[in-house]
Image (cartoon, grey):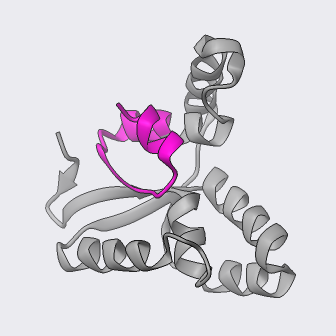
């Protein structure tokens, strides 16, 4: 089931998609750009979490440098859902239930908890591990 409102369908945006959009040398850049345009053209409202903002900044900082990371942070226009203790406890439980805590990263677990809470089934991501954890 896809979450939607009177304003249209909603999709969660993962850090992997953001990095792919920003990094023109990323192997998935072109596919990410096409997917982004498709989502926008289909009327999706896009959002992310405060954890993804942090993760994305760190990823951009370490791969593309401080200037690009800072510029992205200044320009980011996504709606940001600020997680709470319920989301984070569910994420913690999800990580601890995973095999040796290695099958899911904490930020991904938080993202999935938020998606579940909000009833959002669609995600914009290029990270195979994240996409696989949605199933």
Per the rendered image, the range of residues in magenta is 112-135
Q: Residue at x 37, y 65 (%)?
A: 46
129 in relation to 14, above or below = above
Residue 109 at what x, y percent from top left?
A: 57, 33
Quarter placement of the N terminus: top left
Q: Judge left or right: residue 47 versus residue 57.
A: left
Q: Judge left or right: residue 25 versus residue 14.
A: right
Question: Which residue occupies the extreme front position in the image?
Answer: 27
65 in relation to 62, above or below = below
108 in relation to 53, above or below = above
Residue 30 at what x, y percent from top left?
A: 43, 79
Q: Is residue 20 visible?
A: yes
Q: Quadrant for residue 52, please give it.
A: bottom right
Q: Residue at x 59, y 74 (%)?
A: 26
Q: Quadrant for residue 11, please give it.
A: bottom left
Q: Residue at x 35, y 31 (%)?
A: 135
Between 34 and 80, the one lying in front of the other is: 34
Q: Judge left or right: residue 46 versus residue 59.
A: left
Q: Quadrant for residue 134, please give it.
A: top left
Q: Judge left or right: residue 123 versus residue 70.
A: left
Residue 107 at what x, y percent from top left?
A: 64, 42
- Residue 34 part of the magenta-drawn span: no
Q: Residue at x 63, y 22 (%)?
A: 95
Residue 47 at what x, y percent from top left?
A: 43, 61
95 in relation to 82, above or below = above
- Residue 115 part of the magenta-drawn span: yes
């Amino acid at each position: 089931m896809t979450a939607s409102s009177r304003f249209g369908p909603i999709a969660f945006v993962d850090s992997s998609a953001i990095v792919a959009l920003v990094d023109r040398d990323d192997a998935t850049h072109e596919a990410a750009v096409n997917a982004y345009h498709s989502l926008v053209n289909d009327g999706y409202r896009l959002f992310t979490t405060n954890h993804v903002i942090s993760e994305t900044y760190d990823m951009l900082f370490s791969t593309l440098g401080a200037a690009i990371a800072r510029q992205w942070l200044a320009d980011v226009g996504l709606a940001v859902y600020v997680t709470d203790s319920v989301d984070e406890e569910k994420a913690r439980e999800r990580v601890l239930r995973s095999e040796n805590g290695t099958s899911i990263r904490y930020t991904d677990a938080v993202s999935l908890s938020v998606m579940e809470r909000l009833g959002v089934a669609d995600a914009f991501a290029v990270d195979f591990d994240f996409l696989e954890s949605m199933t």
